[in-house]
Amino acid sequence: MDDSVYFGSSVTNSVHCFNIYSGNEKWFYRTDGPVRFPPSYYNDKMYLGSDDGYVYCVNASNGSFV
């Protein structure tokens, strides 16, 4: 989305957001289990599932928990 790329990690149990131009990490959100599937974007929110049994909603611009 815009100048960001988002991906889930089953290694770090988190979702990461990077700037596509600089490669710098903007934010990450940690869960209590692997994130095996890519997050979904809607209305400036990222929705992600984790193997900890929960679905999370975070702000896409800063990674804060919604």
Image (cartoon, helix red, strand yellow):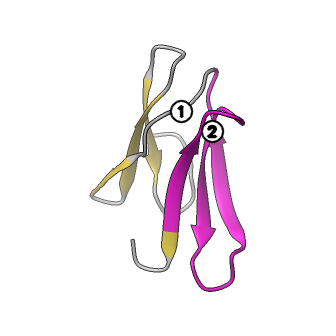
**Viewer-nearest residue: 53 or 56:** 53
- Per the image, is 27 magenta? yes
**Picture coordinates of residue 37, whole percent (x, y):** 43, 38
Mark 1 in CB contact with mark 2 (< 8 angstroms): yes
Q: Residue at x 52, y 40 (%)?
A: 65
- Secondary structure, mark 1, is loop
**Picture coordinates of residue 51, whole percent (x, y):** 51, 19
From the viewer's perspective, tell me whether residue 2 is left or right of residue 3: left
In this rendering, the answer to whether 11 lies above or below 50 is: below
The crowd level at tag 1 (other Cα within 10 Å; few <14, some 14-19, many 20+) is many
Residue at image mark 1: 35
Q: Which image quarter holds the C terminus?
A: top left
Task: Specify the segment rendered in magenta.
Answer: 5-32
Residue 15 circle label: none
From the viewer's perspective, tell me whether residue 53 is left or right of residue 42: right
Quadrant of the rendered image containing residue 1: bottom left
Q: Residue at x 56, y 52 (%)?
A: 63
Q: Residue furthest bottom?
A: 21
From the viewer's perspective, tell me whether residue 36 is left or right of residue 55: right
Characterize the magenta stretch by its predominant secondary structure: strand
Residue at image mark 2: 14
- Per the image, is 25 magenta? yes
**Picture coordinates of residue 42, whole percent (x, y):** 27, 54
- Secondary structure, mark 2, is strand
The amino acid type found where label 2 is placed reads Ser
**Viewer-nearest residue: 59 or 11:** 11
Quadrant of the rendered image containing residue 48: top left
In this rendering, the answer to whether 29 lies above or below 27 is: above
**Picture coordinates of residue 17, whole percent (x, y):** 58, 60
**Viewer-nearest residue: 36 or 40:** 36
